Amino acid sequence: VNLELAQRLLCTPAALSSLEWLELVDRTQTVFNASDASAPVEPLQGQHVALLMPLNVDLQVETFELAAQRLGARLALLDSDAWLQEAHSRWLQSVAMLGRLYGLVDCCGLDASIVKAIQQHADVPVLNGIALASHPIHLVADILAVSDVQGRPIGRLRLLVKGDASAPWSRMVCALAHDLHADVVGDGDACDAVWDASHGISRGRLSAGRASPLASQALAQAAARYRFCLTQALLVWLMK
Amino acid sequence: MPQDSIDHALFLAYPDALLLVDGQGKVVRANPAASRLLGYTEHEFVGKPVDDLVPDTVRPRHAQFRSAYSHSPRARPMGGSRTELVARHRDGQSVMVEIALSPVDVAGQAYVVAAVRGIADYPRVKQAVLRARYAEHVAQIGRLAVDERDIQAFMKRVPELAAQAFQCDGVSLFLLEPDGQHLRLAGGKGPSGHEPVGWRMPLTPNLPGHRVMVQNQSLVIGDVLSEGGQALPQDLQAAGIRSLLLSPMSHEGRPMGLLGVRSREPHRFGDEERNALESMANLLATAWLRAQSEQALQHAQRLESVGQLTGGIAHDFNNLLTVIQGNLQVIEELPLLQGTPGHAMAQSALRASKRAAELTAKMLAFSRRQTLQSQRVDVGRLLGSLADMLRHTLDQHIRIDVECAADCPPVLADVSQLESALLNLAINARDAMPEGGLLRFQAALGPWPPALAGDAQPVGDCVAITVSDSGSGMTPQVQQRAFEPFFTTKEVGRGTGLGLSTVYGFVRQSHGTVNLQSVLGVGTSVTLCLPRWQEPQRVLAARTAVSPGTLPAGMRVLLVEDEPTVRDVMQVFLHALGCDVRAVASAEDALAFDSASATRSYDLLLTDVALGAGLRGTELARLLSRRHPTLAVLLMSGFTQAWDSAEGAPLEWERLRKPCSREQLASALRRALDRVLA
């Protein structure tokens, strides 16, 4: 199956098929394994990536910036407020121009309907904020980190979700665990990682299952590294 | 005092050379002045044939003259009033002289005394010699300008010849850089001025070169020490240069470079030198222009041939893509495929085919075969709007300026293609400025640049739209190939190499010209010269706005397409749009079908333009339109030059470019109907 992510919005847990999740896991793992290699590889050399976001809001996009730059891409930060104001009167032209100037556009902090409207006419991959750590796609990085830190293959992981089971994040964990053949366990059972979504945090707080502060710290560090690798894997997948 | 002693003393003291020659033409005696003039000792003179003392070229004539003189010897000057006499020095050099001959009888023997006076130091002679030398070198440069095909070799040789002619301490040949702010050393000769060829000198106002370029006149600086305000480059000062002569190379009043000579001697250059140097500079300018013109012509011819090849390929691809795209669209919509991996694969293939169609469209644009909807375009408004959008879409490190002259008139062009061309140039500029910089759009009315050989020189003025950047610039090698299709300096797989070539094709198809200037490390500017819009101008009717209305149910369409696979796809599309289709393969079949019924049995004619060996689609449309004035007509082609050149006149029918999607077909059908209704 030709897994082509181009033009696909990665905004909902159901956006990717099982095959695509597996492919993404595989690609992220490959980037992670290769990240220690000394020779710098810049597969996106000469490519241009735009981050369309409100520049007056402090959004944490450093991981994305660094990931894109390490791949050789040139990153432009565009003020979404100014852009939307300009694009208002000539939407098609403005979006088409965005598509001609950049090989990928990530929209951070924009309404999903606007992202979809841009995606419709830009003719390049348009994403809805994968630069932000809160994007559900980064759950893949979390699970890879859990597997790494706990030393268990993904298929044998026991994952626990606390809080609102109907929240998108909780549903995403369950769906992904199902696709990756990991177990979702009930509260009180032994587990390798816990996502606590009970405090209204959009992205569940991840901790190690056995309540070891050291393990949780190692998990957080590994998750950050995997997020970087996942971002790189996605950029290469979408743009190359 | 004895007479002999007096005679001898006179002979020795006489300031002119005296040679006593016997009847056989041999020197019997010579005085010291003769030794000084011709380089032989008095002893060496004795017994030397006097014929040896004239240059080789005149020796035979000299012998004849001597023989004639011996028959009627008398005191008289040698040569006529317009004859310049030349003696041969011992070292082989020629010495300009005046000679007086007198017969002498010594003890019954006939001798001749030749009084020879060197005149090389006479001002008039000096001037004549100088002029002759300058003229000879100017002639040499002229011959070289004609014979030498390699302009670089020519540029190298001219300073050498100039140095020989002026016998000065250095010669430099500079060409004006495209930025107008620098001169580039194109050739040089002499111990002072050690800069290598290619060195760029800023045209700062206090330098003599600046004055020459601004005033477009020669400049003589007699003594840099006494003529205040004349700054010299440091290396020339260090070399002790005192006097300079600079002459501009210009064409139609515009300086394009300068030729300069310099000397350590003050007041070394005068009017003679100025005239000679101006002649050399003019020859240089002519040769340089010719070389540029030849280069441009070769380039244009190469692009033309590549364009023909590209256009042909694009045409064939369009037919193939029509079939591929049409069938994929049908497959994608098959109910049994919905929700299966096959559906995603069909979508992916459809997207790829659309990208392929975009590529062929670019290839057609380069080969000047795209459909243009020329109209009045307000350049100032277009540039302002484009710049506004770019300001919000480009990286903030790139500053964008717009300078549109207040009197800049509108142009005649396809507005969307012009905007696309400008955007292409802006993208190139962005890529050339990874660390940011200045992107500038300028527009002004100006004269048409000189036409290429083979092209008619456009009359009147043009509008020059320039897009410039302060980026990395291009090497001359890259500039040479910049407009070639598929040539790119971007990373493998990044650029299609069709950006600048589509700009070139669009502008040429719009009866304009493109000029690219680039300096490595300084930036690039591309100027599009387009015809100004003039009233009244017959232009293609603007495309009718797409009506949101749907097609009439059961609309009867006569489809004429000679390619069976394309015909099949179009039939499928038309059926899907609810049309009643009659498909035929040729114009002749269509005419037969039309004649078969007394009344018109179809509402719209949809025909390909190129229909094999028979009638063309445009001819068919014309015939059927005459029979049925209210017939809606839609022409389609993947080779749009076909309809652009139809009898040289713009067509009144709607057109559809292949390949097309079903939606594009529906939209074009609607426009064709609307046109008839209107």
Image (cartoon, helix red, strand yellow):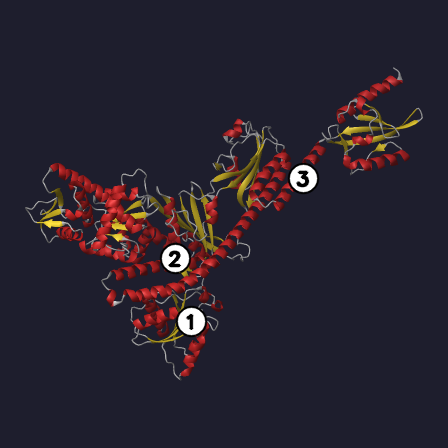
Q: Residues within 10 Å of mark 1 (few under 14, many from 20)?
A: many
> Mark 2 belongs to which amino acid?
Leu
Chain letter for mark 2, please.
Answer: B
| Residue that mark 2 sits on | B359
Task: Tell me if residue B29 comes above or below residue B412 in the rendering.
Answer: above
Labels 1, 2: front one: 1
Q: Foreground mark, 3 or 2? A: 2
Q: Say which of A2 and B599 sits in front.
A: A2
C-alpha gap between disc 1 and disc 3: 71 Å
Identify residue for label 3: B136
Chain bearing mark 3: B
Compared with B615, B477 (above or below) is above
Asked if both marks, 3 and 2, belong to the same chain, the answer given is: yes
Left of A16 or right of it: where is B388? right
Q: Tell me the element at label 3.
A: helix
Q: Which of marks 3 and 2 is nearer the N terminus?
A: 3
User: Quarter-wise, where is residue B221 in the image?
Assistant: top right
Mark 2: secondary structure: helix
Instruction: Let me know if residue B113 appears in the view.
Output: yes
Q: Distance between the residues labelled 3 and 2?
A: 58 Å
- Residue B347, given in percent of the width and then of the height, sits at 29, 60
Q: Which of marks 1 and 3 is nearer the N terminus?
A: 3
The amino acid marked with disc number 3 is Glu
Which disc number belongs to residue B562? Answer: 1
At 61% across and 39% down in the image, what residue appears? B277
| Residue B291 percent across, percent down from the top left | 56, 47
Under circle 1, the secondary element is loop
Q: How many other residues sit within 10 Å of disc 3, few (<14), some (14-19) or many (≥20)? A: few
The residue sitting at 85% across, 34% down in the picture is B66
Label 2, residues with CA under 10 Å away: few <14, some 14-19, many ≥20: some
